Image (spheres, rainbow, N blue to C red):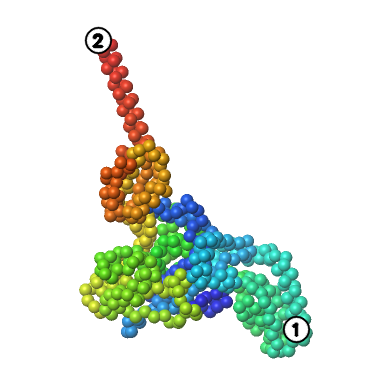
Amino acid sequence: MEVTKYNFPSVLENLRKEIPTCKFISLDIELSGLRTRDDCSNSLFDSVEERYNKHRKGTQGIIATQIGLSIFHFDRDLNTYASATYTFHLCPQFIGSINQTCTFEASVLTFLEKHNFDFNKFAYEGIPYLNKYEEISLTHILKNGMIENFLRYEDVERFWEIKNKVVTWMTSASDKDTLRIKENSILQLYIIDKLKSSFPILTFTTENSEIIIGKNLNINSNSQPATKHTSFNDDVLNYALGFSHVVKLLEDNKKPLVFHNAFGDIAMFYNQFIAPLPASYKSFKREVHKLFPEIYDSKYIILKLKHLIKKDSVFDNSSLQNVYTFFNEKKGKYVCMYSPRIKMKDDFDTKPWFHQAGWDSYCTGFCFIKICHWLGSDNSGSNRPLTTNEHFNAVKIHRNNVYLSRASQPHLCLNENDPANHRPPYLYMRLLKNQILDLPEIASMLSRYGSVDVRKYGKTSVLIAVTGTFTCRKIFEEFKHSKDYDVSVFNPIKHSPILRVTLWSGFFLSSISTMALIFYQLKKL
């Protein structure tokens, strides 16, 4: 289901019923960019902490434009998981002193356009949101009656124009007549609040971007409205929170959350809806785990399934589209018996496609269920329908482990210490001839042997980081007899220019001292 600010209130009521009773929730996020700083590119040299700091600094201004949410319930009798899937369209807002910003990368705009992203829906119908600090700030503004101070002059002029229009309409309107006024967002709430005070005999409803005004036939001009309306402050805060209401539901219910390639999505989710990312990586892990104690990364689990996947049935790579196709259309569809049926409760409003957040969230949940059943059947050693508890027990050792792409460590752990570095040691390459060190040329030359990163290390040498021993072995074999380059395993003591200078200096000083002592002893004779 496509969710905009117009149907969000009714969807929110459904979520308040669906989330407390579900088995798990899968999420996907579509972003306005990937990074805003060139010096924050991923590298095989990155430690987990370095990667986190790169992400924190390099994604400032980037926001989630779509959130996909799929809520899965399980019917044991039918061995069926049913998903309620939503695509939430989000848009930053300006209200009071809160002026949210966002950055779009041109390359991402091209990507979004290619995948049918609806820019009009983003701009005109996007759901607002606030993080915790923005919520506190807006609450303070509303409590102290300062919201009118932030209205623009043209907004105030617009209100008086509408009020005069209502007065004119009332003089000639019949009891069944209605007046429709087109207005949007917070100004719509402000106008309704002011008109209610001035005209208690009128009724006010909204339909998308229109205010619908009618006559209240149940009261006369001397009476008060029959029902007590919520206050303007409550209405404004409730509207401005928008998608943050959904985030609060996720926090309160602590349901298992499933992502595919989770690190960036988790960090973005926290930064946009909770608070700015903490300066400390350890604080980030602690806060995320406190809010969402059970997170699964289907990409991480897939990469741990290699021992179960036969060579003739393996998917090309672990991208979501490839994994979903493997389990839904190829040999993975029949990988084990009694795999649960997975269906959507409602069809998509439009034909689904990859990189649409709602569809991707459904595919993430679909793949997660298939993985759980595959591992559960392998663990039990029998072919039979499994319960949800058995499905989750099969992947509990992978809980809160998050895949890291192109880093010195393959994953991070949200609730424990991170694993040790399992990558091969760095390689040290030295130019043997009097050449100019050309880093891009060396990187291009080495890329034919596998995934590598190079870093300058002195005037005539580089460090090489590789993903696996196969690439490492190929580089050694290729350059074993090279007359231009010398390649060896990096030794910090042996290859450090500073340490070499220090050691030679020490040796030189020690030699001078020894010679001086000998000379002194000989002179005494």
Going from the N terminus, do you reach mark 2 or mark 1 first? 1
Answer left or right for 242 relative to 401: right
Q: Residue 212, image x and y in percent? A: 66, 81
Answer left or right for 190 relative to 381: right
The residue closer to the viewer here, 321 or 151, is 321
Secondary structure type for disc 1: helix
Q: Which residue is mark 2?
A: 525
Amino acid type, callout 2 = Leu
Q: Residue 478, image x and y in percent? A: 29, 49
Image quarter of residue 186:
bottom right
Can see residue 391? no
Q: Residues within 10 Å of mark 1 (few under 14, many from 20)?
A: some
The residue closer to the viewer here, 502 or 213, is 502
Can see residue 154? yes
Q: Residues within 10 Å of mark 2 (few under 14, many from 20)?
A: few
Amino acid type, callout 1 = Met
Secondary structure type for disc 2: loop
The residue closer to the viewer here, 35 or 211, is 35
- Which residue is depicted at the point 40% across and 53% down? 43
| Above/below status of 483 relative to 295 | above
Q: Which residue is mark 1?
A: 170
* Furthest residue in direction top, as rendered: 525
The residue closer to the viewer here, 285 or 491, is 491
Q: CA distance from mark 2 to mark 1?
A: 125 Å
In the rendered view of the protein, which quadrant contains the C terminus?
A: top left
Q: Residue 521, image x and y in percent? A: 26, 14
